[in-house]
Image (cartoon, rainbow, N blue to C red):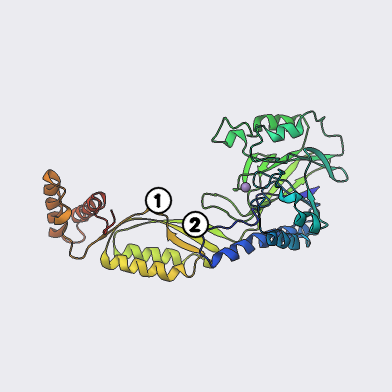
Amino acid sequence: MRFIATADWQLGMTARFLDGQARPRFLQARLDAVRRIGELAGDRGAQFVVVCGDVFESNQLDRAIISRAFEVLRGFPVPVHLLPGNHDPLDAASLYDSATFAARTPEAVRVLREPGVCEVAPGVQLVAAPWFSKRPGQDLVARACAGLEPTPAGTIRIVAGHGAVSSLDPDAADPAAIDDAALRGLLDAGIAHVAVLGDRHSTTQVDPRIWYPGTPEVTDRAETDPGNVLVIDVDPATGDVTVEPVRVGRWAFTVVEQTLNAAEDVAALERRLAAIGAKERTAVWLRLSGTLTMADNARLERLLEEDRELFARLDLWERYRDLAVLPDGHDFADLHLGGFADQAVDELAGMAGAAAESDTDAESAQGALRLLYRLAGAAGGRS
Ligand SMILES: [Mn+2]
């Protein structure tokens, strides 16, 4: 029995960090990824798709987002089961209870509203753990599984939940964390064959039978392996589980780190940016450090200005901006650090100027001066 597990579609996510022109493309890209999931389900003979929470970015969405999502889901060849997560919980303002949702729900769409077992195909059950508020205050997966007898022979059972597992949760005291040790125990006891979870946007194997599919299209630069769904096979005879991550995402969020101390470093950055493919679907955060002359900095500014029009985003990551610009004709004498430091600057300037360019002492002296300049806060007029 084959199905597709996915999660965290975050439809309607606005991505303010992208350039204005890129935002509508990104919104569309999330829907395109969903369309590819439907195609994949058809191509691979999956019986259904389960989306483990955060299908929508929030309960307060433009109606057009729901209509456009439905237009895509209407093309799905198999049922698609939507689990409400922390972004789209079944609370009083739930999008799943809105008039728009109710009026136009496509044939293929089923909302997993009830915690516990739900028959999705002959001999196939989901154990759903939907969210009813943003702060459930308890392990919803444990609650959904409570009191279940072992899976009857000939039946396949899949747990579908949302939230951080305790072994990967930085907030160990979070009462809503999913106790993955206990969940493993339930799988060992035959309560279910496999568990699929939303919330973590990077594809993650917690255990060979406990997985986060991750988001099918990247949402944040911190994600390590986004853009996948899972094609999962459960052997009805043996209960063996096989999981295959399949890429459906097309966008990339990238951090580019470069130290810039000379013209050739700017040229190297230029080559690195040129080598990135599909720039219109790539957002780049630059972490630049070093010290440039006015002329080299002007070259850098030109490069960024030109490339900015190609990328979905290309900008300095302000938190990691550590780039200084030397005024023209700067001889370091105006650092005015005082006392021994001034004396050290004089000595370094002498060393840097005296020897040939290839001389490693001169290079280290220049490096030390650039560092001093940067540390002294004389960074191109910024204070
Ligand atoms: Mn999410």
Which numbered disc covers residue 254? 2
Side of 230 relative to 155 (left or right): left
Q: Disc 1 and disc 2: Cα gap in Å?
A: 15 Å
Q: Residue 278: percent from the left, percent from the top?
A: 54, 67
- Say what secondary structure mark 1 lies in: helix
Q: Is residue 317 above or below residue 198?
A: below
Q: Do the numbered discs 1 and 2 sit on residues whose CB atoms are within 8 Å?
A: no
Q: Residue 123: percent from the left, percent from the top?
A: 87, 42
Question: Total of numbered circles in the picture?
Answer: 2
Q: Residue at x 68, y 60 (%)?
A: 65
Q: Residue 307: percent from the left, percent from the top?
A: 44, 69
Q: Is residue 99 above or below residue 191?
A: below
Q: Badge 2 local density, few (<14 within 10 Å), some, or many (20+)?
A: some
Q: Residue at x 41, y 69 (%)?
A: 305
Say which residue label 1 marks: 319
- Res 44 → quadrant: bottom right
Pick whichever, 326 or 97, lies toward us. Answer: 97
- Res 270 → quadrant: bottom left
Pick whichever, 15 or 212, lies toward us. Answer: 15
Amino acid marked by disc 1: Arg
Q: Report whether the residue tagged 1 is closer than 8 Å to ligand 1.
A: no
Work out whether mark 1 precedes mark 2 in sequence or the reverse, and give the earlier one: 2
Q: Is residue 206 above or below residue 105?
A: above
Q: Residue at x 71, y 47 (%)?
A: 94
Amino acid marked by disc 2: Thr
Q: Report whether the residue tagged 2 is closer than 8 Å to ligand 1.
A: no
Point out the frontmost of discs 1 and 2: 1
Which numbered disc covers residue 181? none
- Say what secondary structure mark 2 lies in: strand
